[in-house]
Amino acid sequence: MKKIFIALMLFLIPINAPALEAEYIIGPSDLLDISVWGEESLSRQVVVRTDGYVSLPLVGDIKAADNTPAKLQKDIEAVLAKFIKDPHCAVIVMEPRSKRFYIEGQINAPGEYILDRDMYLTQVIPRAGGFTEWADKGDIVILRYKEGEQIRLEVNYKKIIKGKQEDVSIKPGDTIIVP
């Protein structure tokens, strides 16, 4: 009977179900909504400062950057417990502003974009309006900072489309240059 139940459960799970994504890591300039249950005067939207901290009533400055929303929630509740009996709060990332990338050159809508999910070069080009008529699709450069050093990735979009080169994952802080 157990084998039949397990087989039925496996049948109900979609084959193409996406894997659970890693939990979001808060970064500088992210807009957070911090709500304290039953304490409206303590609830507010805050922007993570460049030093990685946010300021909240009763809590003071607390490190938000490099934490998950769940970890920040626990940290806030721990401090509030000194002032409020059994505090409960929620931390919601309203705008993931720390996850930006830049695209410039022969693209229809150059500028700064928010990387709101895992994306590849073939996905961000359409987001930026696509190539201009004179774009050199075979000589794209991605400037990326890794461990404090700038690296240069040379990408041939034509080869990606033909399956001869692997698509490149875009990371926060990347600058894509389309000559």
Image: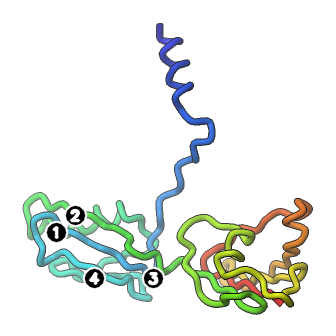
Q: Earlier in the sequence, mark 1 or mark 3?
A: 3
Q: Amino acid at mark 1?
A: Leu
Q: CA distance from mark 1 to mark 2?
A: 10 Å
- In the rendered view, would you say 161 is above or below 22? below
The one of 64 and 131 positioned closer to us in this rendering: 131
The one of 136 and 83 positioned closer to us in this rendering: 136
Q: CA distance from mark 4 to mark 2?
A: 16 Å
Query: Disc 1 vs disc 3: which is toward the camera?
Result: 3
Query: Secondary structure beneath disc 3?
Result: loop
Query: Disc 1 vs disc 2: which is toward the camera?
Result: 2
Q: Earlier in the sequence, mark 4 or mark 2?
A: 4
Q: CA distance from mark 4 to mark 1?
A: 12 Å
Residue behind mark 4: 61
Numbered tag placed on residue 80 in the rendering: 1
Q: Position of residue 103 (x, y in %)?
A: 69, 86
- At label 1, counting other C-alpha atoms closer than 10 Å, the crowd grade (few under 14, some 14-19, many 20 or more) is many
The answer to whether mark 1 and mark 2 are in CB contact below 8 A is yes
Numbered tag placed on residue 28 in the rendering: 3
Q: CA distance from mark 3 to mark 4?
A: 14 Å
Q: Position of residue 62 (x, y in %)?
A: 30, 78
Query: Disc 3 vs disc 4: which is toward the camera?
Result: 3
- At label 2, counting other C-alpha atoms closer than 10 Å, the crowd grade (few under 14, some 14-19, many 20 or more) is many
Residue at 85%, 65% (x, y): give it. 161
Q: Position of residue 154 (x, y in %)?
A: 85, 79
Q: Earlier in the sequence, mark 3 or mark 2?
A: 3
Residue at 88%, 59% (x, y): give it. 163
Numbered tag placed on residue 89 in the rendering: 2
